[in-house]
Amino acid sequence: MTDDLILETISVTKNFFGDKSSGVNNITIFIPKGKITAIVGESGSGKTTLLNLLYGNLQPDHGEVFFKEEQVLSRDRGLQQAHKVMRMITQNGSDMDQHLSVWDSVSAGLPDEDKSLAIQKVTEALHMLHIYQLKDQYFAKLSGGEKQRVTIAKALISRPEVLLLDEPFNQVDATYREGLQHDIRDIVQEWGVTVVLVSHDPAEILSMADELIVLKEGEIVENGSPEELYHSPKLLYTSQILASCSQLTFAQAKICSIKSRRGVVVIYAEHIKISVLGSKWVVKKVLFKGFYEELIIEREEVTLRVINYKRGKYPKGSTIGIRISKYFEFGKWEN
Ligand SMILES: Nc1ncnc2c1ncn2[C@@H]1O[C@H](COP(=O)(O)OP(=O)(O)OP(=O)(O)O)[C@@H](O)[C@H]1O
């Protein structure tokens, strides 16, 4: 393993009850140090199983998991030191004691040590997660977002080298989610922590991750940077996970004046421009998205998603023309 890699799995397989369609199969991945790697994929594709294998929560049926060339979970000797320098956080922070104050919850993550050093570390972690002002509140009384901040502060206090996050923002109100995502990015940069993140949210994945691993039915089907996979997905599956897009058959593509040579055409909403020419598309729905709208438009059998920044200009029932600047073609067998 080179110095810039921290975790790796070599041909790891874990099936449940001998069922090959469960868990993950023959996974080899390399996790770069001090970066955020996101594991993405549809429900049941094996994301949590892979995270648990990295953490040593599960013993692989075949293959090995290494942290800096040390096995995380030895078949003979159990969990190794490598496990101890990692922390895993799940959706609901369920292992937190509801009756402790924020301060006591976070300091419980520290081994016994010098009291003044402990005070310094807890103070630093609470400030880093912007929850110092909540230090005397009971955990049970906090909002979902605040609870998750406390859980992360507790995990970080012992300065782990790797943080494994399984859908960490699910319980966090959308308004606070972005702030927490920024804070995690800052922590990665300032403290050099390596993060492996499981998420379903395309905006979160694209804005947070340095590297993406795409899982389907327990196997890696694509990996690369968010930019690469978003702008040049090799698979229909990847485009559907990462983008707000319309998926068209060969015949539907023809209605959009696209001559497809392959089976399926995918168009991202941002690649459809509203044009003054040819008002053939009917606005069926207008979805408010804050500073822009997403229009659902229809013509014959085709439905498309279009981004509109001129809010209110194209109400439901109005007709518009469109111009498609870019599309992707995929073979049917890829889905
Ligand atoms: N403990 C278990 N016992 C039996 N089957 C399991 C177990 N854990 C996972 N599986 C199966 O393995 C497959 C992958 O599950 P996993 O939870 O890793 O998927 P996931 O991608 O994290 O899904 P989700 O996004 O819905 O959380 C699924 O088919 C699941 O039913």
Image (cartoon, grey):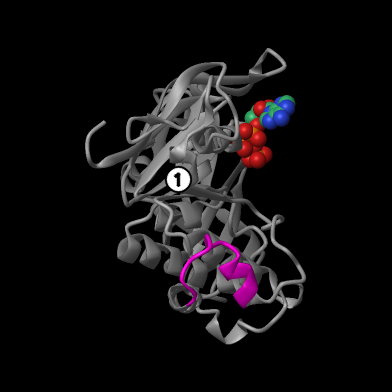
Residue 61 placement: quadrant: top right
Residue closest to the far bottom: 133
Amino acid type of the residue tagged 1 in the rendering: Ala
On the rendered image, what quadrant is the N terminus found in?
A: top left
Say if the magenta span includes residue 275. no
Residue 246 percent across, percent down from the top left: 53, 44
On the rendered image, what quadrant is the C terminus found in?
A: top right
Q: Residues within 10 Å of mark 1 (few under 14, many from 20)?
A: many
Q: Secondary structure at mark 1?
A: strand
For image coordinates 60% across by 76% down, the residue present is 103
For image coordinates 32% across by 48% down, the residue present is 227
Where is 5 relative to 105, above or below? above
Quick check: which quadrant has ligand 1?
A: top right
Residue nearest the observer in this picture, 67 or 265: 67
Q: Which residues are magenta?
A: 103-115
Residue 98 percent across, percent down from the top left: 76, 67
Residue 332 percent across, percent down from the top left: 51, 22
Residue for badge 1: 38
Residue 137 percent across, percent down from the top left: 69, 82
Question: Does residue 54 appear anywhere in the picture?
Answer: yes
